[in-house]
Amino acid sequence: MLDIQKIREQTDWVKRGIQNKNISVDIDNILKLDRVRRDVIAEVENLKHDRNVISMEVGTHKKNNQDASDLIQKTREIGQTIKELDERQRDVESELQDLLMQIPNTPHDSVPVGLDPLENPVVKEWGSRFNPGYKLKTHLELGESLGLFDFTRGTKIAGPGFPLYTGNGARLERALINFMLDFHIDKHGYTEVLPPVLSNVKTMTTTGQLPKFEEDMYKISQDDLYLIPTAEVPVTNIHQGEIVQEQILPIQYCAYSSCFRREAGSYGKDTRGFLRLHQFNKVELVKFVHPDTSYDELEKLRRDAEEILEALGLEYRVIELVTGDLSFAAAKCYDLELWAPAENRWLEVSSCSNYEDFQARRGAIRYKSSADNKVRLLHTLNGSGVATPRLLVTILETYQQEDGSVLLPEILAPYMGSAGLHLK
């Protein structure tokens, strides 16, 4: 959520940022409501001052045995007016809060302006193209021939988009999750957490899923809870409503979770195999950082995710999202994309974002300055480190052999155990 003071003082900048995100919000109406709210507050303060003055006169009249009935009646009338104005203030503040929740985060000044994702600039490429002299099989063909997953039975159990991993496919999925967790904990110094997969309304609101994206989530109406779309949601809310000491920043967590997305509006898009799912697994990275260092921390976060792909020897690229392709809550974002040889396309496996104080303001996540003991909002960041479905697609397609088997990267050996690295 944006600071109303920033909207007042930097109106044109805020309007331009929202326009560059290609989102329509009536900022002038918000400022009008804000003026009404402040006028009501000022009027109430003036009335309270008048009531105090009259109350003192009532005391003086009574002390001098003078009739104070008119003055007493006047204080009652003022009290009734104050009560009505207090109700008016609550109504205006509620309406204003609802409108503020609809304002997206403004892009950082360094973000390229653009509306079309095709305008996203490539800022880095790594690895070499896998192009053997034999015909490549897709991950679906490999998975079926090697008995790694069964989408037909997964659909029977829960419906389309809910995969069933089988045999070495299940073991490989588990191996990838454990490998990534260990990598981020041991090499990058993250603290592991295992969060709930259900979150309440306040938690979803903090990270920006509510109120805007409710239709994209699975809701348990009986308990007013939501299945999480990403571990970002519960992990960012670990410090909801808290004040942490500046000395312990940055705080960085990694977490495995299943993720659940209804993918409303995705009909007609490519839903084959692991390319678009309603349930999938992901290792998430979340940082709580000092505002002065948040963009340095974003680069480190991105690098942490990149090292996973490099350790697995996979070709990838990094793109910087233009303003119109940024998420509702992000101020800046990089996407990491893997090259899937048989799909002959790039597949996104991670988004690394800086939200600045947008989420922190919604969730009252603050730090106490060691210099002046003042309490300020910190900045939150998160990135996938990484999501497994498209990672699995790329590994299978990149490391397939001419005979249709798959020879996995050596770094996964400790995690595959007796199954070994050669899937056949």
Image (cartoon, rainbow, N blue to C red):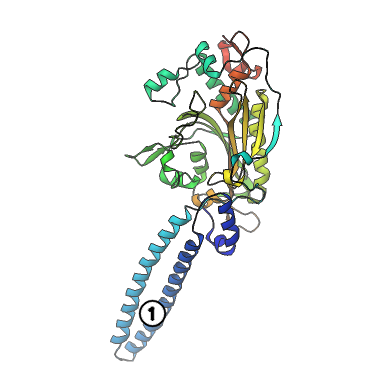
Residue 113 placement, left or right of 236: right
> Residue 236's spot in the image, x, y percent?
52, 42
* Residue 233 makes an appearance in the image: yes
Q: Quadrant of residue 133?
A: top right
> Considering depth in this image, is 360 or 336 the residue closer to the camera?
336
Residue 406 placement, left or right of 88: right
Q: Report the label total.
A: 1
Residue 357 placement, left or right of 299: left
Q: Residue at 50% across / 36% down in the picture? A: 231
> Considering depth in this image, is 21 or 183 the residue closer to the camera?
21
Q: Residue at 34% across / 89% down in the picture? A: 61
Query: Within 10 Å of the Cα at label 1, are there few (<14), some (14-19), or many (20+) other Cα atoms?
Result: many
Relative to 308, residue 62 above or below: below
Question: The C terminus appears in which quarter of the rendering?
Answer: top right
Relative to 48, residue 144 above or below: above
> Residue 2's spot in the image, x, y percent?
54, 55
Relative to 209, residue 192 above or below: above
> Residue 144's spot in the image, x, y percent?
50, 13
Circle 1 residue: 51
Secondary structure category for the residue under label 1: helix
* Residue 187 makes an appearance in the image: no
Q: Quadrant of residue 16?
A: bottom right
Residue 90 placement, left or right of 176: left
Q: Residue at 34% across / 74% down in the picture? A: 81
Q: Quadrant of residue 79?
A: bottom left
Q: Residue at 61% across / 17% down in the picture? A: 414
> Residue 201's spot in the image, x, y percent?
41, 45
Kindly identify the amino acid type of the residue bearing the numbered disc 1. Answer: Arg
> Considering depth in this image, is 409 or 327 the residue closer to the camera?
327
